[in-house]
Image (cartoon, rainbow, N blue to C red):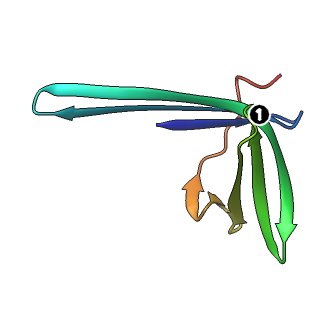
Amino acid sequence: SSTWHFCRTGEFAYAHESSIVVEGMSSGGQEHRQGRWRIDVRGTQPMLILTDDEGRVTTHGLGFDGKATFVDKEKVHRVASEVCP
């Protein structure tokens, strides 16, 4: 599962946890990132620009159909963050 926190201060935090079970053996991992976020428009497409604390920059397309929010064409759920001040 993945969880993103986008704070009003322009900071973000990301956590991803995975687990795999194959023939009775399990494996898993965790990834955590944090950094700064901003919105930019390229042509008519709004883009989410993330710069993590290690300087890596990733760009993601944003969308909204009047009901749902999409990041890179994948529907996401928006809720209040317990991480942001």
Residue at point 53%, 30% (across, down) = 31
User: In the rendered view, does 28 fall on the left or right side of 37?
Assistant: left
Residue 62 shows up from this direction: yes
Find residue 32 and report its horizontal and vertical position in percent: 59, 28
What residue is drawn where x is 10% and y is 33%? 23
The answer to which of 67 and 59 lies nearer the viewer is: 59
Residue 64 place in picture, x, y as percent: 70, 65
Could you tell me residue 72's position as x and y percent?
61, 62
Pick the residue in front: 63 or 54: 54
**Which residue sits furthest bottom?**
43
Mark 1: which secondary structure? strand
Foreground of the two, 20 or 83: 20
Rate crowding at label 1 as few (under 14), some (14 to 19) or many (20 or more) other CA atoms within 10 Å: some
The answer to whether any part of residue 12 appears in the image is no
Q: Quadrant of the C terminus?
A: top right
In percent of the image, x 47 and y 27: which residue is there? 30
- Give the left or right position of residue 64, taking residue 73 as reference: right
Q: Residue 51: horizontal and vertical position, in percent?
A: 77, 42
